[in-house]
Amino acid sequence: MSTTTTTTTTTITQHIDNGAAITIAILSTLSIILNHQSATTTYCIFCYCALDLIFFKKRMDIIIHHALVMSVCFNLWYYSFSEKDVVDTTSKVMIVEVSNIFLLVKKIISDTKMKVPKPVHHMINGLFMSSFIYYRIYYYYVYFLKNDILQGRILHYCKRDVDVIILNAPIYGFYALNFYWAGLIVSKIFTSVKRNKEDK
């Protein structure tokens, strides 16, 4: 296979991957905004993550992310959560996909080498960083980890002490992963600021 063919195939694969990811992010966000979530939405996300891992090459942090998503979905099914409880629980997690929309827009612009005015570029960066910090760090902690109703719901389905660990492990795993990503974002900001100072 020639280098040109390989590059074209890779580019097409990236576009398909980006398109699928941003579609999931937008649909997840809209389902919450329009109050139209269902257990089916959760299991569709499980299928997306599984297919994404099978057909597309991923970084280790994305593999961990998808594994955590699939663990949460599997636990909701295995522990027989009612549809209402599935919706109430996952809606608090799915809202973090808001930040993914802006991240994927950035990625699509980069992959397609689209020319975007600097103010628009800065606005997308700002929306991504602010939505990431708000939803993935603050919101997730306050409205999910520290939500007594949600934690009580999880305990309701636990018959053994180990069940509490199994159900909470991916939930806290998500939060740890978000902090890791937040560290990368801050590191990139400092590097960018330092580079700009050196260029002046």
Image (spheres, grey):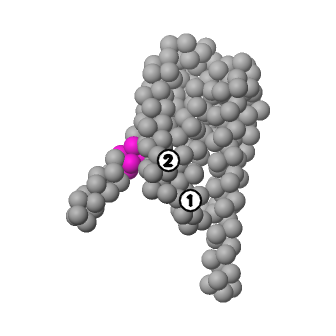
**Quick one: label 1, few (<14), some, or many (20+) residues within 10 Å?**
few
Secondary structure under the numbered disc 1 in the rendered image: helix
* Amino acid on which disc 1 is placed: Ile
User: Can residue 146 be seen?
Assistant: yes
- Residue drawn 58% across the image and 31% down it: 95
Residue assigned mark 2? 124
Judge whether 194 appears above or below 149 on screen. Answer: below
Judge whether 173 appears above or below 148 on screen. Answer: below
Q: Is residue 43 left or right of residue 112?
A: right
Image position, residue 74 (x, y; %):
67, 35
Instruction: Name the magenta segment's main secondary structure.
Output: helix
Residue assigned mark 1? 109
Secondary structure under the numbered disc 2 in the rendered image: helix
* Amino acid on which disc 2 is placed: Ile
**Magenta segment boundaries in residue numbering:** 181-185
**Tag shown at residue 38:** none
